[in-house]
Amino acid sequence: MRSLRPRLAVLAAGVLLATGCAATGTDDGSGPAPSSSAPASSGEPTATESPADPDTPTSWGPTIGEVEEAQQLVSTWSPAQLAGQVIVGRFHGTDPLEPAAMVRDLHLAGVSITTDNIADREQVLAMTAAVAQAAAEDGRDFPPVIGVDQEGGYVSHLRGIATDFPHFQSAGTAIEADLRTGRKVTRLAARATGYELRDLGFTWVFAPVADVTIGAADPTIGARSPSQDPKVAALATAYAVKGYDSAGIVSTVKHFPGHGTATTDSHDALPVVGSSLAEIRAHDLPPFELAIAKHAPAVMMSHLDLTEIAPGVPASMAPEVYDLLRDDLGFEGVAITDSLGMGAVGGRPTPALQALQAGADLLLMPVDTATTHQIVVDALESGELSRARIEEAAARVVALQMWQARVAAKRPVPPDVVEQARAASADLLSAAY
């Protein structure tokens, strides 16, 4: 595949210069991030080399030391532990004991909470606490993935429990109206959302949406997208990432390499996108490129049939699409699939194995969590999945959760978190309209 890195680097640099901001440093004060998470050389340092400082941050959040610690930890794990650490499970009902048992018994990385799992605030707090306790009982001293779709607008699974924010299109509208104010209210809205989610016990948010919509012909993303303009969408996505980072919650830029041009809903069937590589890099990739420059920790892969890149295979299961993300855009963080319970991947025999073999680090919400866990264990034991691939994936997830715990410890949830969230929501709406 022809490299996209030079062209996209120029685009990102142009956007950054135009807005007077630099893609260096992080909101947690850790300073500029290097271009890779490990030193390029191998073996002993030469006279002109020095060992990498373990406190040096990677381009996606964790320090080099945290990555190395995670790698060492997972190298000692059993196939059952490794298989669990690459799965974010789904469950039914509202009993906190059910997801807790899954995390403990299957060694899951964590769980995703949906509207169907929610009763009220007290039940949510009991559920997230039970899941965190289960991970600790399983011997983990880093927090589990406790994630939720809380984008703002109609994709907000905590409606009635957390503050209602306007849809993400409001961020793009605010940026178009006034750049300085727009990027500020976007960042502060994401930060307030992150703090409020942490107050409820969450460690991940499946947001922001980086898709560049095409408007009325787009049945899935629509107002979830910040803009029809790739540059505006890039700015909104990047400043949302900065806001989430500063609140100590893991954000998830989605849905790579861009769902905004799909005219079929991937919840129902596999959309076919015939865009050329040149069209994808011009229209869809800029928000992902800038988000990565702003240290995005995780990227969600789409379920799209990209006929000019990997025809007939969902992007979430196509090595070529992971190569695009890793090799061309330089992303080193956690790649998570979109939900494996969606219609776009229904009927495929082994979607979990296909995704892991292609390059996924986390499998989101397989239809049957326990069965998927056993499939991954069996594939590891038979050699169908290499242990090196799963250790790589599991170590990224563990390192990211170490980062989340460290930053959250430095950034206590404000006592007036609800008031701050309501004010941030009102400010975003006001700036947009």
Image: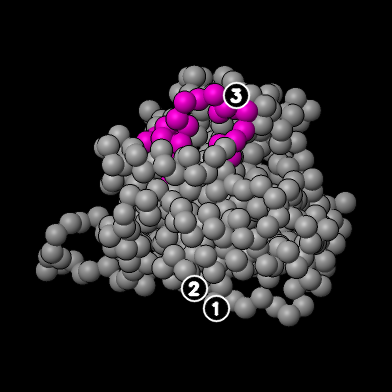
Residue at point 57%, 60% (across, down): 100
Residue at point 61%, 68% (across, down): 129
Residue 159: x %, y % from top left: 80, 55
Residue at point 74%, 29% (across, down): 219
Q: Are marks 1 and 2 in contact (CB under 8 Å)?
A: yes
Instruction: Determine the CA span between mark 1 and mark 2.
Output: 7 Å
Residues drawn in magenta: 338-361
Q: Which residue is mark 3?
A: 270
Q: Dot 3 lies on which element?
A: loop
Work out whether residue 422 can be spotted. Answer: yes
Q: Dot 2 lies on which element?
A: helix
Residue type at tag 2: Arg
Q: Is residue 358 magenta?
A: yes
Residue 319: x %, y % from top left: 40, 32
The N terminus: image quadrant? top left
Choose mark 3 or mark 1, whichever is in front.
3
Q: Which residue is mark 1?
A: 410
Work out whether residue 172 can be spotted. Answer: no
Q: For mark 1, does the 10 Å Cα neighbourhood hold few (<14), some (14 to 19), or many (20 or more) residues?
A: few
Instruction: Determine the CA span between mark 2 and mark 3.
Output: 39 Å
Residue type at tag 1: Lys
Residue at point 49%, 73% (across, down): 406
Q: Are marks 3 and 1 in contact (CB under 8 Å)?
A: no
> Nearest the camera: 237 or 191?
191
Residue 424: x %, y % from top left: 79, 65
Q: Are marks 2 and 3 in contact (CB under 8 Å)?
A: no
* Image disc number at residue 132: none
Q: Which residue is mark 2?
A: 406
